[in-house]
Image (cartoon, rainbow, N blue to C red):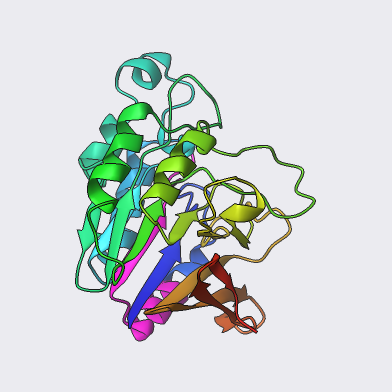
Amino acid sequence: MRTLVHLSDLHFGRVDKAILRPLIDRISGIAPHLIVVSGDLTQRARNAEFAEARAFLDALPSPRIVVPGNHDVPLYNLFDRFFRPLDKYRSHITDDLSPFHVDAEIAVLGINTARSLTIKDGRINGRQIEEIKERMCGLGPEITKVVVTHHPFDLPENSPHDDIVGRAKQAMAAIAGCGVDVILSGHLHLSHTGRSAERFEAGGHSSLIIQAGTATSTRGRGEQNAFNVIRVDGKKIRIERNYWQPEGSAFGIATPEHFEETPRGWVRAA
């Protein structure tokens, strides 16, 4: 079995500092095999914010897969935004914009969807779609395959947002063709689990689409700070939403969700 911790939308520069130490302790106690951070490490892509994010990451177990979000691209400095959009991210966090982890049970590929030409939207380009194929298609069915983006492939029911990642349909064709099992994302500051077959026609394949809320930001959008623990056991996946409980200064676990792989793809277990 493999245990993944999925964090998103840290937003250093606008964090609730009371959460940081309990969050670090909680994750350390879980002892995950891998930590995934799906973007927006900072609020305004400033050096001081990236330095805080770096210190937070260094306090967590490794290995880690980290991708940038739209907030990690400078907003007001137009020269930086268009000519060196991720220089600070590369300097403080990682120079690898397509991080990849693979072992005997899981393969996890990070994809950068942050772009200079949009304020909050994101997209996947053709080269990144090819990389999904190169990394994932050759892996055997015994490997649980995971793709990580900041911008989501799905939206919660009745969501007021329309922030699905650009070129989602083309990317989903590659994801389905390679048998990718799970897509992890954030951006909306809302926890959600969906099935790709409910939004995309992808040849009968259905991936799990798992979104994390904001782990540490004060911009909760009606949901308490949260992160996901994802336990992968062959053809079964368990998702545990960990929600911040300010009255006890600790994280609690919502009712876990259980999924299993079937000939129709991943479905909610009975």
Quarter holding the C terminus is bottom right
Q: Position of residue 195 (x, y in %)?
A: 60, 59
User: Is residue 100 located in the magenta-colored stretch of the structure?
Assistant: no
Residue that appears at 51% across and 69% down: 263
User: Is residue 27 located in the magenta-colored stretch of the structure?
Assistant: yes
Residue that appears at 58% across and 59% down: 213
9 lies left or right of 138: right
Q: Position of residue 135 (x, y in %)?
A: 24, 49
Q: Position of residue 211 (x, y in %)?
A: 55, 58
268 lies left or right of 4: right
The image quarter containing residue 242 is bottom right
Q: Nearer the viewer, residue 140 or 61?
A: 140
Q: Nearer the viewer, residue 100 or 253?
A: 100
Residue range in magenta is: 21-43
Quarter holding the N terminus is bottom left
Residue that appears at 53% across and 52% down: 186
The image quarter containing residue 254 is bottom right
